[in-house]
Image (cartoon, rainbow, N blue to C red):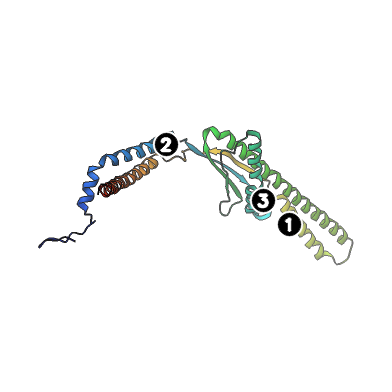
Amino acid sequence: MNSTPGQRPQYDGEISLVDLAATFIRRRRIFYMVFLVITLGGLAYALLATETYQYTSLVQVAEKNSGKSIEEPAKTIATLENRWLLEQETLFRAENDRKLPLSVSFSNPDNTGLIRFVSETSKKNKEIAETVHQNLIAKIQESQTALMERERKSLQNRIESTERTIETLQGGQDTGAAIAEAYERKADLESDLESLKDPEVLVVSRQSADKTGPARALIVVLAAVLGGMFGVFMVFFTQFTALVRSELTEETAE
């Protein structure tokens, strides 16, 4: 440690802010070079990156009495994710010898019987997105139609059974209350039958009005920030390397 009266003690290896500033100024060309390379690289990526859009499809699932879904949308979505979408990916790979160039996400908006498909991809893959969505919608329609037919058959059988019960009661005595109850049950079943609604396709692969990516301005800003940080790092790393090399040279000379 070296010190003189009236001066702050100076310690070996101590670096002041002045030293740091001086180092930065002496090696500022390294900072400029790193900053420009990274920023221009980010700019080039932002300009060359493919524009992407969202493609959305909407399906209203089949409904029975009181607007209740014939099958819970969550169950249908689970089948879409774990079976039907995998089948589409396998089919596309088999036909084109490459991976499906888009993903498909599914959701069920709250308090609705809607299933929403969303894919994000470039315009050149628009037809692929539409084909995949149509195929998945066809799977939903096929499954839902089978469930609807089963529900219709069940209701029709129950109506016919109730009609036979009415016919039997009409031949008996003191059966007025039972007959009235049977007619009421039959009316409820017929109402349930009439209330059945087949699945409905509302939208197929509708392209979003605005681009969803890339965020070019954000990419350039992030590249500039990263370039500045890495540039400062390289300035002091270069200085550190030079000092180590100088120290080793002096020790070798001695």
Q: How far apart are marks 2 and 1 (CA)?
A: 64 Å
> Label 1 is placed on what type of residue?
Asp
Q: At 89% from the left edge and 64% from the top edge, which residue is drawn?
A: 172
Q: At 41% from the left edge and 34% from the top edge, which residue is drawn?
A: 47
Dot 1 surroundings within 10 Å: few (below 14), some, or many (20 or more)? some
Residue 188, numbered circle: 1
Task: Of the two numbered discs 3 and 1 on the same chain, state the one appearing first in sequence.
Answer: 3
Secondary structure found at label 2: helix
Q: Distance between the residues labelled 3 and 1?
A: 16 Å
| Contact? badges 2 and 1 (CB < 8 Å) | no
Q: Residue furthest bottom?
A: 174
Residue 117 in picture, x, y percent from top left:
58, 44
Q: Which residue lies furthest to the top in this view?
A: 124
In the picture of the structure, the residue carrying the numbered disc 3 is 63
User: In this rendering, which labeled residue sits more in front, label 3 or label 1?
Assistant: 3
Looking at the image, residue 85 sits to the left or right of residue 172; the answer is left
- Name the one closer to the observer, 70 or 236: 236
> Label 2 is placed on what type of residue?
Tyr
Q: Distance between the residues labelled 3 and 2?
A: 48 Å
The quadrant of the picture occupied by the N terminus is bottom left
> Label 3 is placed on what type of residue?
Glu
Is 224 placed above or below 111 here? Answer: above
